[in-house]
Image (cartoon, rainbow, N blue to C red):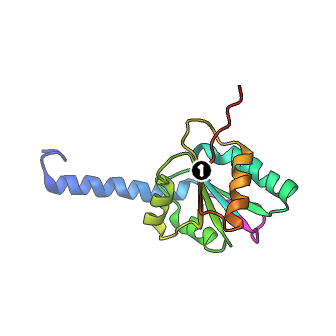
Amino acid sequence: SDEFTNPGKRQMMHAKRMRKMDGLTKKIPAPKLVGPENAQVTLLGWGSTEGVIREAVEKLAAEEGIVANHLQVRWLVPLHADEILAILSKSKKVILVENNYSGQFARYLRSETGFAAHGHIRKWDGEPFMPHHIVEAVKKQLAGAEKISVPVHEILV
């Protein structure tokens, strides 16, 4: 008999896999906050948003006088939920930056930690974020003009 035909063995094997996941969390480094802890805004990203968020943080400081920091989540499973929540709960305002329509990571983060971001910047037009997209959205959200920003890539011909 094997795990496909024996319910007891199936449960045992599933529990074994979950123990491996617990051990894996300890081996994968938790996300680290980049920038000053007392920033006006924390930009939270995952996946391919890291580089453009880093550039946007620099532009916000240099061109707008807005102090921002950045938390980039590299692993969604296993998620370092406790460490992420500890960082975000100290942030003044958290804006989540993601390349999709539905706010997939926002929903996942909330389901795993209970944390809901204060604002969102979402882009789904098939083009990458540009730093100025994030800068403009952060300015609008800090001013209270919007909670969800949807930048559109400008195509010049």
Residue 37 seen from this side: yes
User: Could you say where residue 65 lies in the image, as x and y percent from the top left?
Assistant: 85, 62
Residue drawn at the location 68% of the way across and 73% of the way down: 92
Q: Quadrant of the N terminus?
A: top left
- Does the magenta segment cover residue 78? no
Q: In the rendered image of this protein, does residue 54 appear above or below residue 35? A: above
How many numbered marks are there? 1
Residue drawn at the location 53% of the way across and 59% of the way down: 26
Q: In the rendered image of this protein, does residue 119 appear above or below residue 76? A: below
Q: Amino acid at mark 1?
A: Val
Q: What residue would you read off at disc 1?
A: 150
Task: Give the residues in magenta.
Answer: 32-41
Q: In the rendered image of this protein, does residue 96 appear above or below residue 142? A: above
Of residues 103 and 143, the one nearer the viewer is: 143
User: Could you say where residue 156 lies in the image, as x and y percent from the top left?
Assistant: 71, 30
Q: Is residue 3 left or right of residue 153?
A: left
